[in-house]
Image (cartoon, coloured by chain):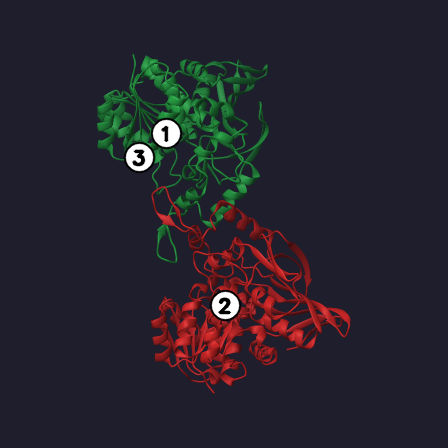
Chain colours: A red, B green
């Protein structure tokens, strides 16, 4: 059954979601896009029209919305008769949008964990601080809420579930590795909202090891990985959403997240961080103006969506999983490789937005067909990964495995 | 004749000026200190009292003053019956304070060139854009105005004049070298107001070579110098006030300014500068707040006056002069070495504030005795350097020379 979709957000990921929904509007029905700044939604619609992404004729409309305003969001859901809300706005709006979905009885999905603007790196597991508090009400009311259905979190959670089901009897280690081996050609830029990007690294680094939360500092633990396509890459243990659900859902496994960083990024990050310029707490200038330094850093950095036209190179994101099968130890790397230029040519966004934006559309299609219409709140590893990875492959993100037998595509 | 002094400013340099005026109030008379924030002046007075700096009993008073308000400054000059104004406030107030002095007929001195907040690095010679436009009126009204009487500009100008008078028939090169080989123990800090400090380096680097202005970028031209006491030091060609008057007043000489920088400083500077965080032009945050990035950087950095207690090591500032005498080529380095800890113990400020704050007090004493009461506007190289360097030596800043015969103190 066709289900109308309301996309909330207007960044690079939203642009991918809009294009991919349009390319599949025979399954998804009407498409509505809403953000604080309506003109950004209009631009996305223009891009969809220009690239002739609409598969069949249908509704494609832009709306102005302050998504922190629950009543306004409910009104827009009702007015547009949307049955699925894809929240790819700032992580500050998650809980408001989720509430609007619960109140109106429609499906909810997002790609990152909820955050409060003035708090960084709360007590693990992070999901328990906000989203999971709504799990019971979702179950009670039969609300489908799929949390963290981007690439990481999202696809990497599905990878973990797939290998648990099919490749291991017992998993001991899940190391999620996120490498962007691309180049944007700017002196410095973050690949998505700088505020959200830096907030990931200024707090403690939580990992789940030996049955408890371990705490490290950012850039304290580094590792060189030799990965398919992108080769040898230096990655650092980083705090990340999916660690907080996989630690609970994949029993007995250590779960760590690793992100690739070049020396230049680390240097810029360290300078800004050591000076206090990445703080989310206000400072006062000599003239008496109260300012949050991180917001000023964001204001001077390139708009990440402006990077796409010049972006070249590839991303490689996957799960390095260790454990045993039939009494033998084994190690598998399950992953996807995406190309920045290909992404831009197809949907006008770079590869990092592409890998984050395709998964929620695949999920929305599975909600529409009923295969993923969970009628309760779930993290991605709680759902059957096969239909998802099959749909993903059709939408442009293939799944590969490297094991004892070498590298091969499995979806 | 005793002359009452009004000190404007309340930073580390003002603190030195206050102490040194107090130590010489038998020559200088009443001492008044004024700044926007009166409590800072009160703190300085408490420091002067604590260290028993007042040579003889006398007036020492704090005042609140917005020095951009010319009428208010004139009123304070009259009320305090001040005959000399030592302006060691922000360079943004120079022209206002100078006007107040012209209108009230009192002597004016400052330690840095006038700047407008929204402009960086104007057309050379810099003095011609602001101060020198008041030269005629000063001459006409018999106003003593001594420009740039800190260490550099200031003492280094007097050094140039001294060696021109006594050590050379012809000068071909004046390279002013400013090395701070001290350590403040913080991860990063500027040694004086970060806003003013960074503004020095974000513009073009002007030097006077082969009879015209040469333009370079900051950190484009570097040189290793082997200097007395501080040893081998890397310095970079930098724009600086004194180049703009010496180019005019020491005929036929190339004039360059070199400042020492460690790799760490350069790295932090480059990151901030390349990101646009040192800009004096406002940016708008996503929330619509207009902010000048440089002012936010200033807000997160340590207050330079807080560095003094932990500061160790020495400064070495001087002129490397080349030319000929009696038909023979010669090269002389004329310089001062100051110690951060000694400065702190004596006046509660670090060495960089000390070297900048002692010279205007020496100058004020010479204005009081009549030796430097020029009755017109001058740069320091236009005045007789001997009484100045003699007074400086008594106040704690000795002058040394390194030439063919080695190193020796000359004042």
Residues B149 and A341: in front is B149
Residue A349 visible in the shown view: yes
Q: Nearer the viewer, mark 2 or mark 3?
A: 3
Give the residue at mark 3. Answer: B36
Where does label 2 land, which residue? A349
Q: Position of residue B326 (x, y in %)?
A: 53, 13
Indicate left or right for B39 with A145 as reference. Answer: left
Label 3: chain letter: B
Residue B39 horizontal/vertical position (percent): 33, 32
Q: Is residue B174 above or below residue B198?
A: above
For the residues bearing labels 3 and 1, Cβ distance under 8 angstroms:
no
Question: What whole-number distance in Å separates the C-alpha atoms at marks 3 and 1?
Answer: 13 Å
Between the C-alphas of marks 2 and 3, the distance is 51 Å
Dot 2: within a 10 Å radius of its alpha carbon, few (fewer than 14), some, or many (20 or more) residues?
A: many
Rendered view: B308 above or below A232: above
Residue position for label 1: B43
Q: Secondary structure at mark 1?
A: helix
């Amino acid at each position: 059954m066709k289900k109308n979709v309301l996309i909330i957000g207007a960044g690079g990921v939203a642009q991918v979601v809009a294009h991919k929904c349009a390319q599949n509007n025979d399954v998804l029905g009407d498409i509505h896009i809403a953000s604080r700044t309506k003109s950004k939604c209009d631009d996305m619609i223009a891009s969809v029209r220009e690239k002739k992404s609409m598969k069949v004729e249908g509704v494609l409309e832009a709306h102005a919305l302050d998504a922190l305003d629950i009543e306004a969001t409910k009104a827009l859901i009702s007015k547009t008769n949307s049955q699925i809300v894809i929240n790819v706005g700032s992580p500050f709006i998650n809980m408001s949008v989720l509430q609007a979905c619960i109140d109106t009885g429609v499906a909810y999905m997002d790609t990152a964990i909820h955050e409060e603007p003035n708090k960084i790196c709360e007590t693990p597991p992070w999901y328990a601080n906000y989203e999971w508090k709504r799990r019971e009400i979702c179950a009670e009311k039969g609300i489908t809420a799929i949390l963290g259905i981007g690439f990481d979190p999202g696809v990497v959670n599905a990878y973990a579930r797939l290998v648990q089901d099919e490749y291991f009897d017992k998993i001991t280690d899940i190391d999620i590795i996120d490498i962007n081996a691309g180049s944007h050609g700017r002196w410095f830029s973050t690949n998505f909202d700088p505020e959200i990007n830096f907030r990931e690294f200024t707090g403690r680094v939580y990992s789940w090891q030996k049955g408890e939360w371990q705490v490290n500092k950012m850039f304290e633990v580094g590792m060189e990985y030799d990965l398919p396509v992108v080769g040898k890459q230096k990655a650092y243990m980083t705090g990340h959403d999916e660690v907080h659900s996989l630690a609970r859902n994949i029993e007995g496994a250590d779960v760590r997240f690793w992100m690739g960083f070049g020396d230049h990024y680390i240097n810029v990050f360290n300078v800004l961080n050591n000076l206090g310029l990445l703080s989310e707490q206000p400072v006062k200038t000599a003239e008496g103006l109260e300012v949050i330094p991180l917001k000023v850093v964001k204001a001077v950095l390139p708009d990440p969506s402006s990077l796409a036209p010049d972006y070249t190179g590839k991303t490689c994101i996957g799960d390095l999983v260790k454990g045993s099968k039939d009494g033998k130890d084994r190690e598998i790397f399950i992953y996807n490789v995406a190309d920045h230029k290909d992404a831009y040519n197809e949907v006008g966004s770079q590869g990092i937005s592409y890998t984050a934006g395709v998964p929620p559309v695949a999920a929305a299609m599975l909600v529409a067909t009923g295969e993923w219409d969970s009628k309760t709140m779930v993290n991605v590893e709680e759902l059957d990964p096969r239909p998802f990875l099959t749909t993903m492959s059709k939408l442009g993100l293939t799944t590969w495995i490297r094991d004892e037998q070498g590298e091969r595509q499995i979806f």
